[in-house]
Image: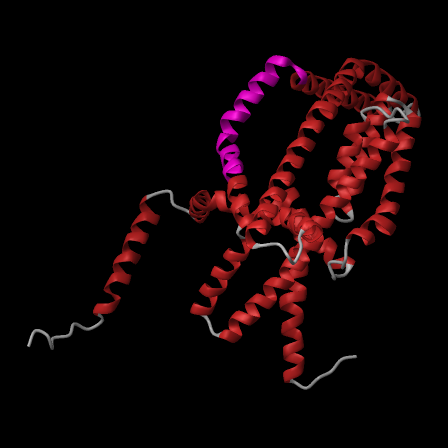
Amino acid sequence: MLKKLKIPYLGILPIILIAAVLIKLIFTTNISVTSIISTVYSCIAYFVWGFVFAYLLNPAMAFFERVISSRKDTLRAARYKRAGIIAFLYLLIAGLCTVFIVAIVPTIRTGVSDLIDNIPRYATNFEIWISDLTNSFDPDITESVELYTKNLFETLYNWLTGVMNLSSIGGAVTSAVTVSAQAVIRMVFGIVVSVYFLYSKEGLERELKKLLYSLFSKTTVENILKISKEINVIFQNFIVSKILQSLIMFAIGLIVLVPLRVPLAPLVALIIAITNMIPYFGPWIGSIPCVLISLFIGGFWPAMIVVLFAIGIQILDNLIIGPKIMSTQVGISPLLVIAGVTIGGKFGGILGMFLGVPLIAVFKLVFYDRLISKKLKEKNIEIS
């Protein structure tokens, strides 16, 4: 009799208990969506960093494998070659970072020190220029402009002096190391994980396919794999090409600006190259502080050189560098590119401005276009 006894809705009892526990936690603790996301990310951070590193280095590894690999290679030989390529890539990155720190950073620091020493002179000259310009205005307006200019330069001078102060630098470094120790550990472990991802990527892909085929139908998995390939092409063409473009622009900036004795030439080249990662707005946003730095330190002609360089490097990038590096364009209109930059910047800051474009492209080309085509086909409508 007891075996035949059935309690109604007994199967949902575990769900009710779990829901009650979650509600209790939510209303009696400080648990929030942000804290939950933060907790989840802290658990998978090493793998996220590793995946990002591996994703960025995979095109370079694939290129070198095509160059040095042969069909006659045994499995062991192919593995040795891949291990050597991975080691070479990370040694190359470490070498480039070392060269930048040793050769470029001291130059930037010296230039900033010169800027600090000459700020009083720049402020005086600028105040004289403002005074001459506003002589025909109302005296109260002139006085307000001069006072604002003086306060601006004093603030800039105090900030730069504090930044360049050795004790402040030491304290800032100590604080930064303390705060970012977890991020540094994540990055180090991420590099280790990325080596495993790169070395065993075929095996990981095979295991992922097994998991997908075990969970979904064959047609669904084929669609997932097809969409994944399209997303990969969009991100790879955009991110990798932008990195290469910025590296080339930085090298050209050093070659052009250093011989012309532009003040803080390495810093100017670096700012323009980094901001070039953001489509349309980036190069011009980066050019403004570079022109101001050159104007204050070097005067009119160095500033004009920077203006001409910024315009010329953009023309060169848009007509030659970009098309040569990108095998295919992102595939969306300039209006959507601007939308991706602005929306991404609103929600993700600088990183959002950078990733907004490929995300918009993924949404349009992979999902929106496919949905529209399906709906038009269902209605037997063809638009030429």
**Which quarter of the figure is the N terminus placed in?**
bottom left
Q: Position of residue 256 (x, y in %)?
A: 88, 32
Instruction: Answer whether residue 186 is magenta in the image.
Output: yes
Residue at image point 30% right, 58% down: 19
Left or right: residue 82 versus residue 361 is left
Q: Is residue 27 placed above or below 233 in the rendered structure?
A: above
**Which quarter of the figure is the C terminus placed in?**
bottom right
Q: Position of residue 318 (x, y in %)?
A: 84, 50
Part of the protein shown in magenta:
164-189
Left or right: residue 207 versus residue 298 is left
Observer able to see residue 247: yes
Q: Residue furthest bottom?
A: 380
Residue at image point 58% right, 54% down: 74
Q: Which residue is more in the foreground, 321 or 183?
A: 321
Q: How many marks?
A: 0
Q: Is residue 289 placed above or below 282 in the rendered structure?
A: above
Q: Residue furthest left?
A: 1
Image coloring type: secondary structure
Instruction: Answer whether residue 328 is magenta in the image.
Output: no
Quadrant in the picture for residue 53: top right
Residue at image point 58% right, 46% down: 80
The kind of secondary structure the magenta stretch mainly shows is helix
Q: Which residue is more in the foreground, 348 or 177?
A: 177
Q: Position of residue 37 (x, y in %)?
A: 46, 48
Q: Position of residue 186 (x, y in %)?
A: 50, 37
Q: Which residue is more in the foreground, 27 or 371?
A: 371
Residue at image point 62% right, 63% down: 229
Q: Is residue 155 placed above or below 223 in the rendered structure?
A: above
